[in-house]
Image: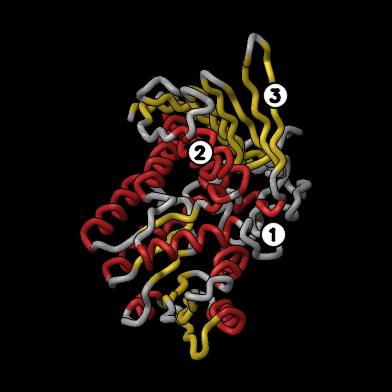
Amino acid sequence: MEKVRVGLVGVGGIANGKHMPALSKLPNVEIVAFCDLIEERAQKGAKEYGAPGAEVYTDYRKMLERKDIDVVHVLTPNCSHAEISIAAMEAGKDVMCEKPMAINYEQACQMLEAKKRTGRKLTIGYQNRFRQDSLYMKTLCENNELGDIYYARAHAVRRRGVPTWGVFIDEEKQGGGPLIDIGTHALDLSMWMMDNYEPELVVGSVYHKLSSRKNAANKFGSWDPAKFTVEDSAFGFIKFKNGATVNLEASWALNAMNIGEAMTTLCGTEGGVHMDADYSGLHINGEAHGKLYTKDIELDMGGVAFYEGGSETNPAVLEAQAWYSHVTNNTPLTTLPEQAAKVTQVLEAIYESAKTGEAVHL
């Protein structure tokens, strides 16, 4: 069996935690090139996950000159997603780009234009769509069991979980904090479930309330307030053209006990559903024969992102399988880049509304 040959640009946390372990489970895929500004990271990735003779690069342009690379995974800080993805497509490669699609909507649209112009395939890394609870909820929506879904709560809140490594708290590199980092997953799930990609009006607020604290209690260790240039919390209200609304909550540090991320609650005319914070189940509510009812759905705990293992319930593996099935057999693509671009548009509008104090009309 001829294998699909892959090159990685960025061999940091998301490459080690998600992409390389997932790709190692696919028998028809081999990673032949590893590129990172820190050469030692690329070398380590090549040693652990590389095909025989895998090469290491510090300049992605050099890597893209290779004619034998079929697919490129863009796993770099948000500010370079568009630049590298466009260059890869122009070099004749299909592209899997990590979320968010781009640092702003303009760059996301440039990626879509490059996809159209080059005829290459493009997807964005929203692996939470492949969790067992997400897939079950999507089936409920597709079967119209919730009726007309007119309200959703997109939830991505940590009590204290500021990522203190890499460039997560650097606004120039990332474009934002928890909103663009984990809020993007919750919003993507909500819009995907509702199958609603026509936002009309956005109102947002962002806060820098806890980021200035020194020696703060935090799951990943104290942060340096001088380097914490992104928001610590962000909240948005999105109204769609059909009248539906989404409330989005995103925070790395919030004095709240109702925590959980990459979650959505849906409310429709025929019923509603919400997710467990540990992704282990769903809770459906509705009305039948003049009485209210609730129904609990228990699911495989393997749906937790990046867990040890690699069974068919691992969302990272399922995402990779779906993507490479699309690449090799042109099967339907689960995460359309046009959808991801709309998520980016809404995120940017929340930041803009917070900056101006005005509603943003899209």
The answer to whether mark 2 and mark 3 are in CB contact below 8 A is no
Viewer-nearest of discs 2 and 3: 3
Q: CA distance from mark 2 to mark 3?
A: 25 Å
**Residue type highlighted by circle 2:** Leu
Q: How many marks?
A: 3
Lower sequence index among marks 2 and 3: 2
Residue at the spot 43% in from the left edge and 60% down from the top edge:
97
Task: Using the rendered image of the protein, determine whether residue 167 is visible from the camera's viewpoint.
Answer: yes
**Residue type highlighted by circle 1:** Tyr
Residue 166: quadrant of the picture: bottom right
Viewer-nearest of discs 1 and 2: 1
Quadrant where the C terminus is found in the figure: top left
* Residue 275 in the image, given as x and y percentages of width and height: 65, 36
Residue ranking furthest to the top: 290
Q: Secondary structure at mark 3?
A: strand
Residue at the spot 65% in from the left edge and 43% down from the top edge:
252
* Residue 51 in the image, given as x and y percentages of width and height: 52, 84
* Residue 263 in the image, given as x and y percentages of width and height: 61, 39
Query: What residue would you read off at disc 2?
Result: 187
Give the vertical position of 161 relative to 297 (above or below). below
